[in-house]
Image (cartoon, rainbow, N blue to C red):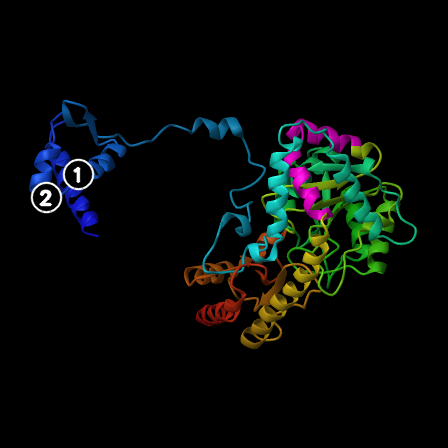
């Protein structure tokens, strides 16, 4: 502690000399500073190095330490880029709070990536070690992915489908580096800039950003209680000329809504009648609590459903591995875009992901995960109902990672989120999840983050700041 204060005193003294001294002047030697401050040579050296790193002084061995010219303000002229770049497809707010906030405060309910204790850490570490030691760490994979991993994704779809399956095989699967990158490829491959894409409202902010990045025009369709009505979807196709519908049928992000089998069949029938594609984002496949995900693609025989699934949330964010399933010319176009964009996905990451999901411990982990998510969901929901009122929680989802809440329509949710963040609690404002103006004051709270024992404290802070607003 004494060393730190002495170092600061030396640095302060040298700054005073630099402030009044001429450029090129010599500063006191290390020996004189040691004598003046009663410090060790190492302490003096650290103070001098701090100022040298800032570009204020220069040390010349054998000659001394000299004052450098005052640094000029860094004000480059970037104005030419405004005209050259033209309009932006996405604003600076396109990246949602869930990613932009990074780690967040102590009571973190903004990020939809499960905390480490909910992940199969032992399986992941073992798999990565095995992949690093083996052939996968130095070999080139095929552009569409490891055959065994593609077969695993195809088998997962067939296992979740009805008796009359769609016949999805490994040949219909392309391994991708996570779902976000794949979304951009799907939008680019299946539509042209200026085309329309229908989206549920609210929906995943990353899909909204990816569609706009691809130059598409988003046509919002209201969810209703859980799913857009078949009639509303048909009208959106008719009025816009869209041939793409992006959807999350299972435990949707942010609402947690789940389509029923009849609702799913009606939506697929509309797409079939309109010769349209459904982009099925099965992001929460492994996060069922009281229900399981039954992919739409398992009921589709003619290539109307383009299926997307990632392992980054359920296995590990360090394993950016996922899959796209498509049939016919759509598959070929998506594959070309993926190859042009990334060439291939790391073979080592693919091998590690396959190792994890084919280990007998994976199924055991999923059972424990389901129980842990149920406890966390019920814990957070209970505090919301008791402290914010039963009408605040829109409904209790049967899976996923999030709770969707609605406040009084007069509440400025962005202001509330900012106040809560300053008080140590994070959540995401609902406006980020709507491709158009939100019809109310919503927020998303995630229950898969760290410290679930502090959910009650966190909701108390939300209630306090809500009252102050």
Residue 263 coordinates in the image, percent (x, y):
82, 58
Residue 124, compared with residue 346, is above or below; it is below
- Count up the numbered dots: 2
Q: Which residue is mark 2?
A: 37
Q: Which mark is residue 251?
A: none
Q: Secondary structure at mark 1?
A: helix
Q: Is residue 336 magenta?
A: yes
Residue 104 coordinates in the image, percent (x, y):
47, 54
Q: What residue appears at the point 17 percent right and 38 percent down from the top-left corner?
A: 44
Please give left or right for residue 163 compared with residue 295 in the image: right
- The span picked out in magenta is 332-358
Residue 30 coordinates in the image, percent (x, y):
13, 34
Q: What residue appears at the point 11 percent right and 39 percent down from the top-left corner?
A: 34
Q: Secondary structure at mark 2?
A: helix
Residue 83, compared with residue 115, is above or below; it is above
Main secondary structure found in the magenta portion: helix
Q: What residue appears at the point 83 percent right and 51 percent down from the top-left corner?
A: 159
Q: Which residue is mark 1?
A: 44
Residues marked 1 and 2 touching at CB (< 8 Å): yes
Q: Is residue 288 magenta?
A: no
Among the two numbered marks 1 and 2 on one chain, the one whose residue lies closer to the N terminus = 2
Any part of residue 129 in sight? yes
């Amino acid at each position: 502690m004494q060393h730190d204060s002495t170092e600061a005193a030396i640095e302060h003294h040298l700054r005073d000399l630099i402030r009044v001294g001429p450029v090129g002047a010599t500063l006191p030697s290390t020996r004189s500073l040691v004598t003046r401050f009663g410090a060790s040579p190492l302490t003096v050296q650290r103070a001098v190095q701090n100022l040298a790193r800032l570009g204020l002084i220069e040390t010349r061995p054998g000659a001394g330490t000299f004052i450098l010219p005052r640094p000029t303000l860094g004000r480059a002229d970037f104005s030419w880029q405004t005209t050259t770049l033209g309009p932006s497809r996405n604003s600076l707010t396109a990246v949602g709070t869930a990613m932009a906030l990074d780690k967040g405060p102590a009571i973190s309910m903004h990020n939809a990536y499960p905390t480490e204790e909910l992940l199969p850490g032992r399986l992941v570490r073992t798999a990565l070690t095995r992949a690093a030691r083996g052939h996968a760490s130095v070999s080139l994979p095929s552009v569409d992915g490891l055959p065994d991993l593609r077969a695993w994704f195809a088998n997962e779809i067939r296992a979740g489908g009805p008796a009359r399956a769609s016949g999805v095989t490994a040949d219909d699967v392309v391994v991708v580096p996570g779902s976000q990158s794949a979304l951009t490829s799907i939008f680019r491959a299946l539509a042209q800039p200026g085309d329309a894409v229908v989206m549920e409202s609210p929906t995943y902010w990353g899909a909204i950003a990816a569609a706009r990045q691809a130059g598409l025009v988003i046509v919002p369709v209201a969810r209703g209680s859980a799913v857009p009505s078949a009639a509303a979807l048909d009208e959106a196709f008719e009025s816009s000329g869209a041939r793409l519908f992006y959807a999350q049928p299972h435990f949707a992000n942010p609402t947690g809504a789940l389509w029923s089998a009849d609702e799913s069949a009606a939506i697929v029938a509309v797409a079939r009648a309109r010769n349209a594609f459904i982009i099925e984002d099965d992001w929460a496949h492994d996060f069922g609590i009281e229900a399981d995900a039954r992919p739409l693609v398992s009921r589709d025989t003619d290539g109307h459903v383009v299926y997307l699934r990632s392992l980054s949330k359920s296995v590990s964010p360090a394993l950016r591995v996922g899959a796209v399933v498509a049939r016919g010319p759509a598959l070929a176009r998506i594959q070309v875009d993926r190859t042009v964009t990334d060439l291939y996905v790391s073979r080592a990451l693919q091998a590690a992901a396959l190792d994890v999901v084919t280990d007998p411990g994976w199924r055991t982990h999923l059972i424990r995960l389901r129980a842990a998510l149920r406890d966390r969901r019920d814990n957070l929901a209970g505090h919301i109902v008791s402290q914010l009122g039963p009408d605040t929680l829109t409904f209790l989802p049967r899976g996923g990672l999030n709770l969707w809440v609605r406040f009084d329509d007069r509440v400025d949710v962005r202001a509330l989120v900012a106040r809560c963040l300053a008080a140590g609690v994070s959540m995401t404002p609902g406006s980020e999840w709507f491709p158009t103006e939100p019809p109310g004051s919503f927020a998303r709270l995630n229950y898969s983050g760290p410290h679930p024992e502090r959910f009650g404290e966190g909701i108390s802070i939300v209630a306090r700041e809500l009252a102050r607003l």
